[in-house]
Amino acid sequence: MLKKRQNRSFRPGFYPKLLQIRRLIRGFISCFRPRFKILAYHSLNHVSRDPYEVKAEVFEEQIGFLAEERYKVVGLEEAVRIMAKGIIRDKTVVITFDDGFASLSDFAFPVLKNFDFPATVFLPFNYIGGIDAFSYDKPRPDMPVLGWADIEDSTKYGIVYGSHTMSHRNLAELDDTELSFELSESKNILKRRLGLDFYALAYPFGMFDERVKQVVRDAGYDCALCFGNILSNTKSTDVFEMKREKILNSTSLDDFADLIDVRKDSIRKIRDIIRRALIINA
């Protein structure tokens, strides 16, 4: 005689926990995807006056380290292309600068030219040829911004420009009209003044939300850059949320070597997955 099949019941919370485990497994698998780094600099000088201002000689050491260790420094457009193809070589790095400070002409561009390394500079267009009146509460007269003559001259040796919007305001705080203007007008200037057909944006202060991302797409940008917790990029990275690693005044050469090593990102991510797995099983 056949026994009546017993109804099986799962304890409350079983399925949500199962979904969490599946996410952890996908995250673990992603740790082993090829990755590349995007570096984010701001200003350079012989004497650092700001946490974001890297000493010129330190910058030169860092760029020399990339060359000595045979890192492949590519332009941002090429990085987006290799992401789309899913072919990411080991030791691939992209160099970027935010704010377009005039010190780049003296301390960054000659070094990059010497090593034949490309870079992308993100400009706040309202301040071209002026001073930094956007980073802090008070203007900084001692922090001039690149003028058009230096900008146009630098394009002859591998420097490419992108948008840091018109006014460098937090885009997530703008209404739709202001947001559309900031993005479309800065893109038009890149096309009109520099003849670009690849358009990159760096979110001011790294701030954005889903609404901002959608407007960036609709405005015709090819990619947008921010900052994040896992600071390297894979073929599955959203091109409108590409992660960058901040290089600061406090970044020593040893720190720099660790920051550009994508294996360290994978280790951090694995540790985070283990921590979350322990929480799920608790």
Image: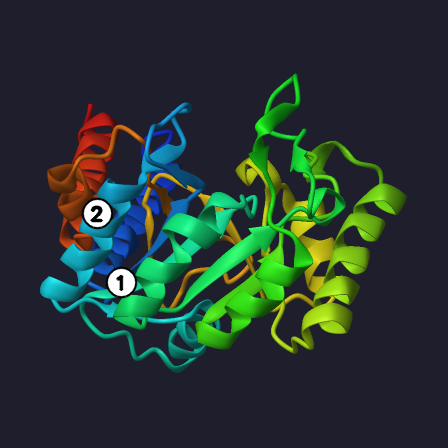
Question: Residue 202 location in percent, x, y?
Answer: 56, 50
Q: Are marks 2 and 1 in contact (CB under 8 Å)?
A: yes
* Kind of residue sitting beneath label 1: Arg
Question: Residue 223 location in percent, x, y?
Answer: 56, 63
User: In whole angstroms, how far apart are the C-alphas of marks 2 and 1?
Assistant: 9 Å
Residue under numbered circle 1: 35
Residue 174: image quadrant is top right
Q: Of residues 195 and 244, which is closer to you in this image?
A: 195
Q: Of residues 149 and 266, which is closer to you in this image?
A: 149
Residue 272: image quadrant is top left
- The C terminus lies in which quarter of the figure? top left
Instruction: Say if 73 sits above or below 8 in the image.
Output: below
Which residue sits at x=40%, y=47%?
Answer: 40
- The N terminus lies in which quarter of the figure? bottom left
Which residue sits at x=22%, y=40%?
Answer: 273
Which residue sits at x=61%, y=67%?
Answer: 152
Q: Is residue 200 visible?
A: no
Side of 58 relative to 110 (left or right): left
Question: Residue 31 location in percent, x, y?
Answer: 21, 55
Residue under numbered circle 2: 265
Side of 13 relative to 21 (left or right): right
Question: Residue 117 location in percent, x, y?
Answer: 33, 69
Name the secondary structure under disc 1.
loop
Name the secondary structure under disc 2.
helix
Which residue sits at x=56%, y=48%?
Answer: 100
Q: Which mark is residue 190?
A: none
